[in-house]
Amino acid sequence: MTIKHSIQTAFRGLETNRARSLLTILGMVIGVTAIILVMSLGQGAQNLILDQVKGMGTRTVIVGGGREPTGPSDAGQIFSDSLKPRDLDLLNRRENTPSVKYVMPLVFGAASASYQSDTYNLTIFGVSPLMEQIFDVPLKTGAFFTNEDVRARAKYVVIGNKVKTQLFGASDAVGNIIKMKGNNFRVVGVLAERGQDFFNFDEAAIIPYTTAQDYVLGIKYFNRFITEASSDALVPQAASEIKSTLREAHNITETDKEDFFVITQVDLAVRLSAITSVLTIFLTAVAAISLIVGGIGIMNIMLVSVTERTKEIGLRKALGATDKNILTQFLLEAVMLTGIGGVVGIILGASLSWAIATGITRFTSIVWTFSFPVSAAILGISVSGAIGLIFGLYPARKAARKSPIEALRYE
């Protein structure tokens, strides 16, 4: 019996019991769909995060207070008080950091803003006017505060587009007074809509960092320093100069005792990429469990099929079919079931991923790109075929070993 004839025979065997065949491949369809969906959305999330990080500029060097976070238990490090005003002065000195173009202090926290009877919970960013240059945040109306306003601790605020809509509706916000933490702030500008970004400025209030420290957050330290190197080539040198300056200022001689950390844009991109990759792999492994369940289901159905088709097996053997022919037929049936399930799962998973990506982009402010994971498709179809071979082998061997005489007598 040729392979072509074996395939045709196996296909006719599946076609005879269409309903059972469809129910059998359902487990494979669900498993492969889940793998494609998880890996596609994981790749989309990774692309979104990396695009946002790259939007900060390739020359950006971030300085954080406290030890460098290595896991969820270190989340509290973002509120470390190790970065002081003296550190800002030292980093701004050209003799200390000749490769650094500028340094912007950053403090942040949560607050509620109110205007008349409307209230909105937002994020406070205390920055300097360098904010416009570093994050490329264009204004829709009004103007940004100045360095003089920072020195004067002026109660000026630039609000995000969503904050403006929630508090003022269609009315002009510039010139009006909003209240935050019991203080009156004059709105001097409204940011243009940006959508979801590394920092969500649409739902933020941006004020001078001195004002934020004294009137809103009640702190004397900084959460971050956002710095920029003079050129792409000088990024490593700038990071080294910052570390040396802060180590000397904090009297630190051993690296493991540093109370600050320095991350370049490249470092941040690599770390975030690694995190999303690990999460994607973990979720894919969880989704793959359904493939094993589907394989067990296929083996059970094939065993039932062997029992129901005992007379057919006996008749074929009586007409000259060998054990190998019977084994090949039933094994091909199992592989065809899993293979079809894999192909349907790939198509369904890709379609759902595209629909979700399109929906996120259309109905939210997030620009989510659809990514078809070719590696996941190859993995899905390969694993499907392998499961068909593995879980179909036992029923196929059982069918092949049946005695033709006993099979013909079977009722």
Image (cartoon, grey):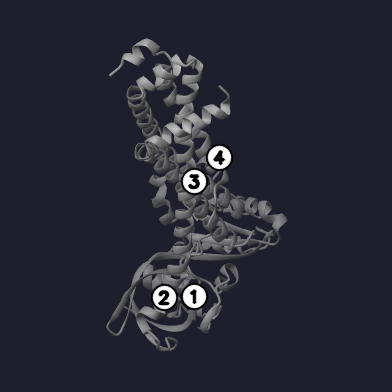
* Residue at the image point whose x is 41% and y is 75% from the top: 162
Find numbered disc 2 in the image and state the secondary structure of the residue it sits on: helix
Which residue position holds label 3? 346
Badge 3 vs badge 1, beta-carbon distance below 8 Å:
no
Question: Sequence order check: which comes first, mark 4 or mark 2?
Answer: 2
Q: Can you say which quadrant of the picture contains the C terminus?
A: top left
382 over 129 or under it: above or below: above
- Amino acid type shown at disc 4: Ile
Instruction: Measure how far apart labels 4 and 2 are at the Cα level.
Output: 43 Å
Closest to the observer: 270 or 45? 45
- Amino acid type shown at disc 1: Glu
Find numbered disc 4 in the image and state the secondary structure of the residue it sits on: helix
Instruction: Measure how far apart labels 2 and 1 are at the Cα level.
Output: 8 Å
Question: Sequence order check: which comes first, mark 4 or mark 3?
Answer: 3
* Residue at the image point whose x is 44% and y is 63% from the top: 359
Q: Which mark is residue 193?
A: 1
- Amino acid type shown at disc 3: Ile
Question: Sequence order check: which comes first, mark 2 or mark 1?
Answer: 2
